Image (tube, rainbow, N blue to C red):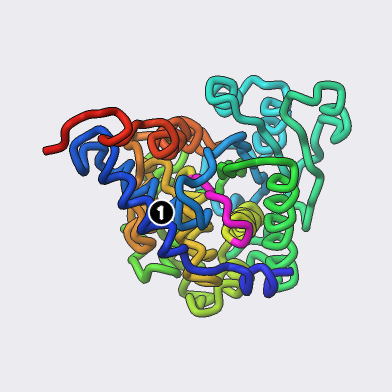
Amino acid sequence: MLESTVAAIRPLDETAMAAARELQGRLTKPAGSLGALEPLSVRLAGLAGACPPPLPEPATVAIFAGDHGVHAQGVTPWPQEVTAQMIGNFLAGGAVVNAFARQAGASVTVVDVGVATPLLVDPAADATDPAGPRLVAATVRPGTRDMTVTAALTRDEARAAVETGIRIAGELVDAGAGILLTGDMGIGNTTPAAALVAAFTGADPAEVTGRGTGVNDGTYARKVGVVRAALDRHAPDPADPLGVLAAVGGLEHAALTGLVLGAAARRVPVLLDGVIAVSAALAAAAFAPDAVGAMVAGHRSAEPGATAALRHLGLDPLIDLGLRLGEGTGALLALPVVTGAVRVLHEVATFDSAGVAEK
């Protein structure tokens, strides 16, 4: 599945992009006056191979959840059980991601790809409310291994997680989703995210490791040391993205990599959230450079690794609010911006059709 998905990813359609640029130049507004929305609309036309491209709706945020063996190194003060508890909160509709999803009119799918603590929810219980958040049980293993001691995952486990993300992307698109939003949950997951960013960009761990949930100075210094130790132990090769994910990644990072690849193969945009998502996007780009054409950077996370990753990918974030929550919250806040960029091509009159004189 991974190889066939990568093979299906193609460059953006230059003819559709040229048509979108030409149309932008005829709309009743000064050229360039919509700033970043104009090149975004052009890129989405290239992804769809049509001008105007389809409106990016309905929207679905896919939250991949997993736990991390590196938690044992004291990289966060939060207990690992919080991952499972937050899944219950997502399914009950009580998290920030739920509030933002309701505001944006987006659906929520939660995918347990590797939670270590047994969930206190019934995977079938959400069927009683078809409009509510749903849970997909897709556990590859109950959490990763400690990456400072051994590889976090075997290559087969990493592949299984990536292919879970590909499968979820296909199911969501087949169900009608016009845009996929990345979400994540996993206590300690900014530590492997920093390791992934450092591995793929070549940045020093101190430059791309952040404070995650807000750790103190001592825990932060330990966290940087843990990332450095894991990279020194495994020396992951960025030309081998599956190997990088296996060595220092998380199950949710690998699954998000698959989601991005699956969306790109289906020519559907994927709206990236914070540092977990963009670290996975680096892996996706290493598998298939043309996958970047499907990526839209929703926001600039306060985590320093996010800025380094976006720079490496050549993506500019749509909003910058100092967020560092994860869950998909920043992507959901950016969703109306993406929709607006496309709606302009559909609904704004041209100078000719409106009878407005040009310059």
Question: Quadrant location of the N terminus?
Answer: bottom right
* Residues shaded magenta: 265-272
Percent across and percent down for residue 9 are 58, 68
* Number of marks drawn: 1
Could you say which is closer to the camera, residue 123 or residue 82? Answer: 123
168 relative position to 306: left or right: right
76 relative position to 228: left or right: right
In the rendered image, which quarter is residue 354 located in?
Answer: top left
Q: Residue sitting at 65 percent across and 41 percent down? A: 177
In the rendered image, which quarter is residue 91 located in?
Answer: top right
SS at mark 1?
helix
Q: Is residue 115 visible?
A: no
Could you say which is closer to the camera, residue 177 or residue 223? Answer: 177
Question: Quadrant location of the C terminus?
Answer: top left
- The residue most toward the left is 359
Q: Amino acid at mark 1?
A: Arg
Q: Residue sitting at 52 percent across and 38 percent down? A: 55
Q: Is residue 134 visible?
A: yes
Could you say which is closer to the camera, residue 359 or residue 173? Answer: 359
Q: Residue sitting at 35 percent across and 63 percent down? A: 312
Percent across and percent down for residue 277 are 51, 50
Q: Which residue position holds label 1? A: 43
Circle 1 Cα neighbour tier, 10 Å, few/some/many (<14 / 14–19 / ≥20): many
Percent across and percent down for residue 84 are 72, 36
Q: Is residue 276 magenta?
A: no
From this view, report whether residue 54 is shown above or below residue 333.
below
Q: Residue sitting at 26 percent across and 37 percent down? A: 34
Percent across and percent down for residue 271 are 50, 45
